[in-house]
Structure formats: structure tokens, C-alpha cells
Amino acid sequence: MDLLDYAFMQRALLAAVLVGITAPAVGIYLVQRRQALMGDGIGHVAMTGVGLGFLLSWSPIWMATAVSVLGAVLMELIRWYGRTRGDIALAMLFYGGMAGGVMFINLAPTGSNANLTSYLFGSLSTVSESDVSAICVLAAFVVLVTVGLRRQLFAVSQDEEFARVTGLPVRALNLLTAITAAVTVTVAMRVVGLLLVSALMVVPVAAAQQLSRSFAATFAISVAIGVSVTIGGTVTSYYQDVPPGATIVLLTIGAFVLLTALATPVARRRARAAAAAQPAGDPAECAIPATRGSGD
Amino acid sequence: MSFTEGVMDTKSETVISLRGVRAELGARPVLRGIDLTVRHGEVVALLGANGSGKSTAVRGIIGQVPLSAGRIELFGTDRRHFRDWGRLGYVPQRTTAAGGVPATVTEVVSAGRLSRARFGVLRKADRRAVRRALDLVGMADRAKDSVDALSGGQHQRVLIARALAAEPELLIMDEPMAGVDLASQEVLAETLREQVAQGTTVLLVLHELGPLEPLIDRAVVLRDGCVTHDGPPPRALGQHALPGHDHVHPHAPAGAEPIRTGLLS
């Protein structure tokens, strides 16, 4: 594997694998609570953070983390308090975030829209040493939350009202989910870009659902898909000179199509197994009673 | 509670107490001063037409609806300071136990055990309690199946098993029979009978008494946010009282306006 001889490829692959793990790990809870597009909204807000980073000459990745965490908390509070016109408030936040990013980066002495593009669509080969350490720290946080609190997050995402009656700190867990999603967005920003982040959070989960019956299996399969496509996309982009972010997302969608096609025979086999397990004398299929002929 | 206490003492212990409870949804008053007491071991049905406030009353008891006046106590503790959630099992008004991601029956029911499990770690005893809860509702053979593959009545049985997983002393159920076929209604009634026999206190919102009628000690009827009846279950009148009329409408489309009984509306 000659590509591992290059330090920039080692960094790129490490970053890609971490994104492949964290994005579906958070995404599964967002899909479970039917907020699949939350990652997309956070991605828009994170643009303001990138722009601010350039304007103030601070690290764009940490600045984006700070701003997207703030945005995610704001979204959660809007969901909590402003039930009536929540969608309008969210739209303001999304497009305000995007416009803010473009504005700040153009005000910055060193910035231009070209810089922004590398954050919008990812720029895996330019991931620096300090980017990698930031990504490692953030990814560790995401894994700790999504695996360590899986039972609590499952309960809250499955049925919020019931979770509150079991005494879980539902509001805190919701905020934690939002913050974790925001952190994941900035982890994935350099790899697939802010505009494509949400695809890696949602599509592997949707693909895994085609095969799985349990939450645990869906979690494992979607992370496996995430890691496979991020490694696959990175390696492909090295040999074929195609943009890694777009390659990764297209591979993810390919995995979804493949698993959907596989799901039909699997479901059929399961149905057959269930029919075989039926006790005798309990027909699995409808039958016309013997006393009735086909002619009547 | 210890076993050394006299039966009479536990019998008279107040489990739920509402005093002068008022609540508004938006600007509309939904509860206008409700008094309600449920004692240990009682089975109390909250009845009333749509919009009478029965669901709001139950959601107020578990802290889902803010009160504008009045006081609620659970096991003698002010509801705002009540933290002992493992003593309470709640069945929300739902037609499905499924979320946006596949989950097995066991995974969903295990969520009900979190009130007893410290830091969300399920030990052997917790897993046993989950299995027992599945046995109680007759769903043990479906434990590993996805909840997506269940019928309406089975969803309701899963939701009840989730509440029973905590081995609660008090069960609060919001329309547990809604959208449930007759066979599942009988299973649920039997489950409830066993729980009541073991001393569980039950408060349930019902649209009609149905197969639960023989279990119910007391009926509280709400109308426009006020209690209009508190006593023995009201007798069915007219054709509803005819033998064989079990007053179940399992074929009504989900979400349709339930048929009003002259008695309750």
C-alpha cells in the first residue's frame, strides 16, 4: 500500500475513519427521533464559525465547533419553547448561518470564497497535524456519548414523554444529543464538507435499516458502512483524482441501493423460516375450505 | 412500605391526590379545579368525552402539563419533588411503539427498566424483570422481533410491558384499549387482573369500560374540566346495557371520532 507512505494520506485516512464511525453513531439517534435533517441545519450554522475563524485568525475547526454547538443548542431550545412557528425560526438560523459565513470570510483579510469551498465540500488532502488532533479529541467525545449513554439516548429518542416519566433528565439528554451532533459536523467538515455532512449521518443508518431488526444491529451495521465508505472513498480519490467528499457520499448511496436490493430476499427467507416454525395444524397461508368447490 | 404494616394501613394509603387542580392549554382552561384521590390497591377509571380533560389530568399527574393552580401529590410527596419514578409505570396514549429506527420488542421494553437501573446499566435482575414483563403480556415469544412487525394490539401490549418492566406499585394508563382488537383486549384485561391481585394501584383513562369493567372499583367522570361523578362505575343504559353488547368498536378507523355514548358525553 504505497499510499500509506505519505503523511498526508495517513492523516486523511485517520480523519476519514473517525468520521465514518462518529457520523452514523450520532445520526442513528437523529433518525430515530425523526430529525434526520438536523445535521444539515447544523452544517449551515457551522459556516458562520468557519468565516469567523478566518476573520479573527483563529482555528476555523474550533471556531466552527463553538458556533455550531451554540446553533444546535438554540435549535433545541426553539424546539422546546417555540412549538408554533419553530420551522420559521429554524429557517432563519440555517440561512443566517450560511450568509454569515460568506460575509465573514469575505471581510477577512486572508479569506476568500475559495477557502470556504474547501469547508463546504471537504478538503481531505489538506488536513493538517493540528486538524487531526482536534478531530481525534472531538471524535472521542462523540463515541463516549453515543455508546456510553446508548440506553438513555435510545429511550429519549424513542419516546420522549415516556422517558421523562422514568426520571431521565430528558432536557439535558436532548441538549447533549444536539451538542454531539454539532461536534460531529465539525469532525466531518474537513472530510466530506459541511454541505455533505448530513448524508453520512443519515444514509448509512437508512441503509442498515434495510437489513436489521434491532437497534443494536442497526447501530453496528451503520458504523460498519460508515467506515467502509469513508476508507473506500479516500482510497478511490487517491488513485482516481476525484473529490473525496463527493466520492464518499456517492459510495454511501450506492451501499443503500445495494442493501435495499439485498433486503427483499432476506425478508423472504425470514418469512419462510417463520412459516416453518409455525406449529402443525396452523396453516401459514389462507386456504379455501375443502367443502367449497372452486366453481361456486 | 414494609410487610409489617397492617393491611388496613396500606389499604388507606393515598397514592395519588389532586386538590383544586387547574390547567390551561393555551388560553383555554382544560381543568377547572379537579379533586381526585386514589388509594393503595384501588383501580380507578377516568371517563369522559373527548376534550373533557381526562388526558390532561393524567398528564398533569406525571408532570407533563404545567398546572396553573392546585396541588398534586404522588405517594404523599409533592409531585414537583417526586423522584421515585421506579414506583410508577406509565402507558402513554400511542398507537405504535416504533420509532424512526428498527428496535426489538426487548429493546423497547428495556427502556422501561431505566427508572430502576443505575446509570442505565441493566444487570441480570433487570433483564429478568424485562422478560417477566413480556411474559405478563404474552409477548415473550416475540421478544426478538422488530416492533415494526407487530399488530396494533401487540404494540399496546409492548407499551404496557414497558411500564411493567419497572415493577411499579402504581400504573397510570392513557387509553390503553384504543385501537386494540378484542383478543388483545382480553389479554390486557387478564394482565391487569394479575397486577391488581398483587396489590398494584391503577389509574386509567378510558373511553368506555369494555372488558375491564369487572376490575374497576371506582369511576371518575369528567365533563368540561370538572368532576361530575365519583363513585361506582356508571351502569350502561339503553341498548348498551343489553347482554352481549360489549361496546367495543375495534373496526373503527384509527383517529376517527369515537362513537359517543349518551352516558358520557
Image (cartoon, coloured by chain):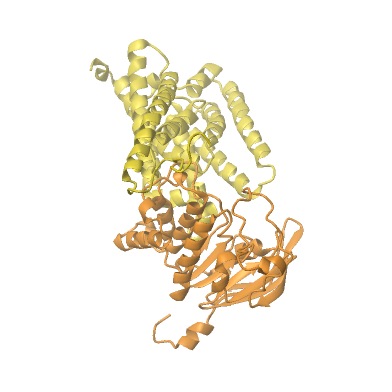
Chain colours: A yellow, B orange
Quadrant assignment, res B243: bottom right
Q: A210 and A225: which one is in front?
A: A210
Q: Position of residue A67 (x, y in %)?
A: 54, 37
Q: A150 and B13: which one is in front?
A: B13
Q: B107 and A169: which one is in front?
A: B107
Residue ID at (51%, 67%): B171
User: In this orientation, does residue B169 appear?
Assistant: no
Q: Position of residue B82 (x, y in %)?
A: 52, 69
Q: Is residue A155 above or below residue A204?
A: below
Quadrant assignment, res B210: bottom right
Q: Position of residue A122 (x, y in %)?
A: 45, 22
Q: Position of residue A121 (x, y in %)?
A: 48, 21
Residue ID at (44%, 70%): B194
- Image quadrant containing the N terminus of chain A: top left
Q: Is residue A14 above or below residue B191?
A: above
Give the total number of marks visible in the rendering: 0
